[in-house]
Image (tube, helix red, strand yellow):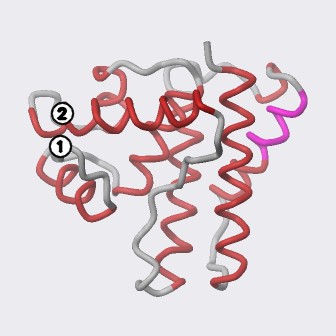
Amino acid sequence: MQDDLSYDTWTVMLTQADAALGASEAHGVVVGLICAGRVDDDTAIAALGANEADPDLRDGLETARRRIADGLAEGGLGLEPLLPDDERPAVQRSRALIEWCRGFVAGFYFHDRDTKTSDHPEIVAEALNDIGELAEASGTVGESDLSELVEYLRVAVQLIYDETAE
């Protein structure tokens, strides 16, 4: 994957590594892991259910984790959930957003399933609950609602990172 972090590149990388997740969900897992302070390659590979020996996956995750963590540490709301390109139908992008939220929640709680949202400060618990509700959504949203949800996620994830990452 080298430096290309596009949706299509993630899809190819994950397919080659026999990962159990698609690109959006996998990106959400990695972001969730980072927000929870678990940022090593082995944990990320285990959370993705991927072939741990795949060198392209390791290289790709290293690049992705570094960029995501740096962006969150800078606090500029630069994180964008990884979704298909805007040229693809809103239905496909909407489903990918739901998958991203599922991945984020799974990554955030990976290896720490006993933690409850109430174990976090109220503002973090509220953001985690909101993302969890999006993860359980069924259906799709229109393009304008999708843009608003992406913006909300950017803010919510930054808030969670700022409050919980070590």
- Would you say 38 lies left or right of 108 here? left
Which structural element holds mark 2?
helix
- Give the residue drawn at x 82%, y 33%: 125
User: What amino acid type should be assigned to the residue bearing mark 1?
Assistant: Gln
Residue for badge 2: 59
> Majority secondary structure of the magenta segment?
helix
Indicate yes or no whether the magenta region holds residue 165.
Answer: no
Segment tinted magenta in the rendering: 122-129
Q: Which residue is drawn at 46% across and 87% down?
A: 89
Query: Considering only order in the chain, which callout, 1 or 2, is on the residue closer to the N terminus?
Result: 1
Q: Measured from the top left, where is residue 104 in percent x and y? A: 55, 43
Q: State which quadrant residue 165 falls in.
A: top right
Q: Height in image: 72 above or below 132?
A: above
Residue nearest the observer in this picture, 77 or 86? 77
Q: Nearer the viewer, mark 2 or mark 1?
A: 1
In the rendered view, does 43 fall on the left or right side of 72?
A: left
Between 63 and 29, the one lying in front of the other is 63
Q: Where is residue 72 in the image (x, y as percent from the top left)?
A: 57, 34
Residue at the spot 75% in from the left edge and 23% down from the top edge: 163
Residue farthest along the top direction in this orientation: 166
